[in-house]
């Protein structure tokens, strides 16, 4: 889940009402949360095996990241730069 970044501009106008930039940021944030969190909990990103390989080859990865491999129908977690399949028994 990518949380939208706020630019740091003013969040309220001189009349106390929120700025359009702040309202847009709130809308993006709410949409992101709605797309990734439901009544059952968080929904991990659904990626292809090729997308997963691309992430593994990059320097931008974080230990503990969960993803769903939508081609192999497997949950995976990043451990030291490699996504490992989670086995449910």
Image (spheres, helix red, strand yellow):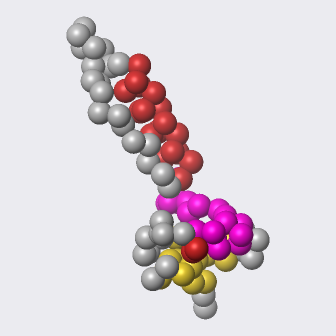
Residue 71 image-quadrant placement = bottom right
Q: In this rendering, does residue 36 appear at all? A: yes
Question: Which range of residues does the magenta coloring cover?
Answer: 37-55
Return the x and y of residue 60 as percentages of the image width and height.
48, 66
Count of residue discs? 0
Residue drawn 25% across and 8% down? 15
> Residue at 59% across / 61% down in the picture?
45
The vertical placement of 18 against 41, above or below, is above
Toward the bottom, the furthest residue is: 89
Queried whether the magenta region covers residue 42, the answer comes back as yes
Q: Can you give x and y, in whole percent of width and height, for residue 61 in the image? A: 47, 69
Which quadrant would the C terminus be assigned to in this image? bottom right
In the figure, is residue 15 to the left or right of 81? Answer: left
Q: Residue 21 vs residue 57: left or right?
A: left
Q: Is residue 67 visible?
A: no
**Residue 39: x, y in percent?**
52, 54
Residue at screen point 30% across, 27% down: 9
Asked if the magenta segment contains residue 40, the reply would be yes
Residue 2 screen position, x and y as percent = 48, 51
Asked if 24 appears above or below 64 in the picture, the reply is: above
């Amino acid at each position: 889940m990518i949380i939208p970044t706020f630019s740091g501009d003013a969040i309220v106008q001189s009349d106390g009402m929120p700025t359009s930039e702040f309202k847009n940021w709130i809308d993006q944030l709410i949409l992101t949360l709605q797309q990734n969190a439901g009544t059952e909990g968080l929904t991990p990103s659904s990626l292809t095996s090729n997308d997963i390989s691309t992430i593994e080859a990059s320097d931008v990865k974080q230990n503990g990241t969960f993803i769903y491999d939508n081609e192999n129908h497997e949950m995976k977690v990043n451990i030291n730069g490699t996504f490992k399949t989670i086995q449910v028994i």
